[in-house]
Image (spheres, helix red, strand yellow):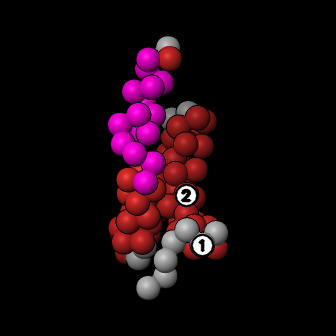
Amino acid sequence: MSEWMMKLNPLAHMEAGDYESFWHVMFSTVLLGFWGRLIAAGLLLLAFWFGVRRRNFAGGVFCFLVAASIAYGAAILNFLGMLNSN
């Protein structure tokens, strides 16, 4: 079980600085604007579909949490001073 968890840990494959810069680039470019809204809207639709149609509560909650992190992740990182607003 621990080997499986170590394979999922991104810090086992890259340095902490590289991992932080990856998320910095994601939130400052891709997840802002049109594409962020499109991905978040699609995930909200998937959350509704999983929760209501498929009656899979865990899948619905997961999609909702990912959509919320896309929608509010950049604002939270900017508030914490971890995202440079150019």
* Quadrant hosting residue 27: bottom left
Q: Residue at x 55, y 63 (%)?
A: 73
Front residue of 45 and 21: 21
Q: Answer with mark 2 or mark 1, whichever residue precedes in sequence.
A: 2
Check residue 14 for magenta coloring. Answer: yes
Residue 29 percent coordinates (x, y): 36, 71
User: The residue tagged with tag 1: helix, strand or loop?
Assistant: loop
Q: Is residue 39 visible?
A: no
Residue sitting at x 55%, y 42%: 62
Please report the residue visible at 53 percent of the width from the left and 37 percent of the height from the top: 59
Q: Nearer the viewer, mark 2 or mark 1?
A: 1
Mark 2 neighbour class, 10 Å CA radius: few under 14, some 14 to 19, many 20 or more: some
Q: Which stretch did the figure color magenta?
A: 3-17
Instruction: Residue 38: give x, y in percent of width and height.
Output: 39, 66
Residue 12, image x and y in percent? 41, 34
Residue 49 place in picture, x, y as percent: 49, 45
Q: Which residue is mark 2?
A: 69
Q: Which mark is residue 22?
A: none
Q: Main secondary structure of the magenta part?
A: helix
**Identity, as a three-letter code, of the amino acid under mark 1:** Gly
Amino acid type indicated by mark 2: Ser
Relative height, residue 6 to residue 48 (above, below): above
**Dot 2: element:** helix
Q: Is residue 31 magenta?
A: no
Q: Bin the neighbour count of mark 1 within 10 Å (Cα to Cα): few under 14, some 14-19, many 20 and up.
A: few
Residue at the disc numbered 1 = 81
Count the labels in the image: 2
Tag 2–tag 1 contact (CB < 8 Å): no
